[in-house]
Amino acid sequence: MNPNTFKINWVGSQCIDHSLALVNREICKRLIAENKFDIGIIPYEEDPHFVISKEIEPIKERYTAASSQAHITVRHQWPPDFTGPNSNRWILMQPWEFGSIPRKWYIPMKYWVDEIWVYSTYNKECYVRSGIPESKIKVIPLGVDENKFHNNVEPIALNTNKSFKFLFVGGTIARKGIDVLLQAYLDEFTQEDDVCLVIKDFGTDSSYKGRNFGEIIQQIQSNKNNPEILYMNHHLSTDELAGLYRACDCLAHPYRGEGFGLPIIEAMACGTPAIVPSLGPSKDFCQEDTTFFISSQQERLVDKKISEMETVDFPWWLKIDKNELQRKMRFAYENPDIVQQKGQKASREILSTFTWNRSALLVSERLQEMLTEEQTTRLNAQEIINEEIKKGIELYQQNLANEALGIFLRVLDVYPTSTHARYYAAGAYLQKKEMNEALEHFVFISNTMHRQSESFQATIWNYIGICYVSLKEYDKAIDSFRKGMKGDSINQSEAINCYQEMMKHSDKKEILVEVYRDLGMHYFEIGNDFQSEEMYTKALEIDANRQDVQQSLQKVQERIMRIKETYASRRSVSEVKDVKELYHRIAHKFEGGEEVIRQLREYWLPYFLPGDKVLDIGCGNGLLMEMLNRIGVETEGIDFDKEKVAQGRAKGLNIEEKRAEDFLAGKEATYDGIFMGHIVEHLAPHDLLNLLIQCTNALKNNGKLIILTPNIAHTPVLENFWLDLTHVRPYPKLLMESILETLGLTVKESNYQNDNYDYYVVAQKNVHEVLWQSPIYNASGYAEEQKSILDALRPFSLKIKVEPVEPQQKPELTSKEMKNYLEGLQNNKLEQLLIHYQAAPAYLFAPPRAPISIGRTMFETDSLPPGWVEKMNGLTEIWVPSEFNRETFAAAGVDKERIFILPGTLDDQLYNPERVQPYPLERANLFNFLSVFDWSKRKGWDVLLRAYFKEFSANEDVCLILKVSKMQEANVSPYEEVLEQVKKLGLSSAPSVHIIESYFTEEEMIRLYAAVDAFVLPSRGEGWGRPYMEAMAMALPTIGTRWGGQTAFMNDTNSYLIDIEGVVPIDRNIPYFGQFDGHKWAEPSEEHLRLLMRSVYENAEQAKQVGKRARKEVFATFSKSKVAERMYRRIDELVQRFYS
């Protein structure tokens, strides 16, 4: 390769007097002299009065047109030009002094430019923090001309008699720190001191003009009571500038922001040391033995902009310690020998490393490397947009809405027609309640979305409607919502919320009649007939002549009557007159087959309650009957096998050797449940139908029939099905479901089991259909509670369709068996939906989709967030876990008649310390306190750490284990927070703390409880306090706050309650909770917590007895079977109230 055949175009100012032009001249003239490349110069701005010296003439000779083609283009100018150059590769050399870069630079720098050159490591760090890939950024430090700037320069004469001279060189602007320097100088020195501050101002005839401190300096200078200042604003040649540096003793440059700081290295090269901040670009070329450092720290600026340029994040510069600057100036003034020593060392260091020759060499080497490297393929515009939007969505899902919005706006800065970027930006504004901004983006989309899907268009119109509602422009809102009628259920939910808002705040009848009419229609579409009827009725009260409303009202009333009639006269077996009729109605309806092999009988125990009477058809020797008897279920069994019957009777089981048809003859409404495991495949269709008719008759009013049979859809089952000579035929799952439904039963569960070898069907009489929306597959307390309750509801006559609502699911946290059960419920189809149940924070409640609506929620302070009360008063009932929330909700405005207490629950079979293998701890020999919480001030982790560190020493055999999640504060570092607490307390050593951040399954959590000695959590507020209950269920001595929902099950005999110092207002700086004005929560007593932890530690055996009592009392009242029964009874009462 011959490099000089490669064309390099260098774009930027040359013949003008400012620092960027100086850098361009010094590097370009050396590249031209080196003659390794064909250098072309594309000038940016020129000063016609600039003197062209001989050394600049070669640069002028290389001037070329802006359209000139090259292999590589280097741009170094202000402002930067992001127009694509006429070259294969593109380098941007760009300093920046304010930390976070301008927003419009982000996309071009990240995706368009091949490489970015900066002057300093600090500048590189700022770019990386702004989101520019570190690999794209190279540091090209600036330099000095060693022939001009050196220790032997002749000093110029200065008009002062003072012997010690401080020097400032640069534009006298705030960014350069001139104001801090002046104040420090005036505060530290007087006119009596033998000192002068020399200021060479470059700001009077440059881009700094109008922003410099020239007039202020001259006013200070004119006051003879001030220490002496020599102010210079005339032009100096390079030789004169070098002489100025040499004539002074110490450069003072307390910059707030610099790209590099050329005057600093120029002064140092001339043997004049500098006083500079401890941070910033000077760190690259200043050390303790060459410089006086001033303490500094980064200071965030108020606005996300510099001048008119909006920035990626809040820009920052350095905050200078003025007092330390004074001390350093005083020290330099009083120690001229040290100043001289530093200056000599500084000169040697700079002249050996930071010269223009070295800068040009680094540029040349990098250009040569680039020419040998394979060029990276640039993403096209759509790929860039997709990449950034994906990143923005990830941030949004982590509750980092501001950061996500920044990404979307950066895309729009460069690609303003991107519908997706605009959509997500509008959504982020919407979440931030900045409605005008959101509306601007949504309206823009609405004008360009004619090619988008109907669903997308409907979504946009609904969002526009939401914005108009917030802005109280209700007529425009209604018009927008009507345009969005074809949207999905999420759109409808949002629309309903907004219509309710308009209904509450509008007093114009012409608006209200339209609101009632549209609300009635929405409620009807989602199945909420009672509220639909109410809205249409209200519309007619305003305008009785609205025929469209009259017709709609008639339609909803007809549907209500149909449901009432259906409910009152349920389909029954009497509709099927005999076996022949049933046979002809079902036979050959479906063809094909389904699976085989049986599930362990233990799986079916949760489907029955103590006191139930169950018949096991084909019971064998009574294995299932034995297990049912142990939990209080009365059983009977029948089987053909004489030997097995005898075995069962020998165990005292009630088993008869009879045909099922004979056994069931005349038995009406006898059983709560009938189980047939691997029976139906042994029966011919006629016999099966006859048996199922008899079983249906033998079931009580809410009785259930469970059928387990081979799944011949599974290939291994089909291959082996006929190896059993007693098999008559397989019965596919859909066929079995159809038979049972035709008999008037409701199929409440139908799913596969035993690795798909079997399927099962659970059919029941008089079932209520429930749509169940809640978190299921995440690590939240809501998800764990809902799984426990769903598991315990198996015996009851409810057909539940589960719809998990969490956006980021972690199914691995759920056991295989539970997941199988839940998937079956997710696949359920509802035909006659009566109950819509939701469990979540109330702000997530969707409008009811059934006539009876239930919201399960809780809150941790003494009041409720804005909007919660309205959401809850729009539902039939609100279920809270404790009296604590009943009182706080009612006090906040929730209708007390709607509030029902349904406590939390746990599974006593899972939470059993005698059945659990403890989790392996690193230091199991210690006394281990455990705390389980999401990292939030609400959980009192700060109180816990202070109490623990103050009460225990590093010499004691104790450890605090923190099992934490970070849903509330995703970016927090618990480890750093712990270290910060140690630091604040001034501890040289501390007792052991172990932090666990990884996700645990429920099984792993139970094992962790089993491995520790005590549980502690000084929470400031809980709606229920599930971790307390989990710890108590595992017989742990449990320390918790004497305030909140947990007091429903914690008391002074079964736990250790922390006294509170009071119920206090919530600090506004606390994430999430701090935004709610007037809310209060408890402040746990740190001193009392110390006493309790010490007591549990020193009286471990006594504490264990308290833990055992806790477990006994928790399950005596809050077992999942008791809570599930309470839940079912309440649902049944509500159904009876509305439909009996």
Image (tube, helix red, strand yellow):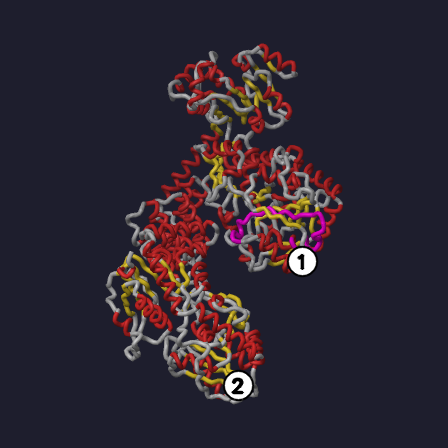
Disc 2, SS = loop
> What crowding class fits label 2: few (fewer than 14 Cα within 10 Å), some (14-19), or many (20 or more)?
few
Q: Quadrant of residue 121?
A: bottom left
At 41% across and 43% down in the image, what residue appears?
Answer: 489
Taking the image as shown, residue 431 lies to the left or right of residue 89, namely right
Instruction: Tell me if residue 954 is in the magenta stretch.
Output: yes
Query: Image quadrant for the N terminus?
Result: bottom left
Residue segment shown in magenta = 945-971
Give x and y (percent) for residue 232. 43, 83
- Residue designated by label 2: 163
**Residue 208 in view here:** yes
- Residue 347 is marked as none
Please state which amino acid type lies under the numbered disc 2: Ser
Whichever of labels 1 and 2 marks the residue nearer the N terminus, that label is 2
At 63% across and 42% down in the image, what residue appears?
Answer: 921
> What crowding class fits label 1: few (fewer than 14 Cα within 10 Å), some (14-19), or many (20 or more)?
few
Instruction: Tell me if residue 801 is in the magenta stretch.
Output: no
- Residue 988 is marked as 1
Disc 1, SS = loop
Please state which amino acid type lies under the numbered disc 1: Ser
Q: Which sits in the foreground, 878 or 388?
A: 388
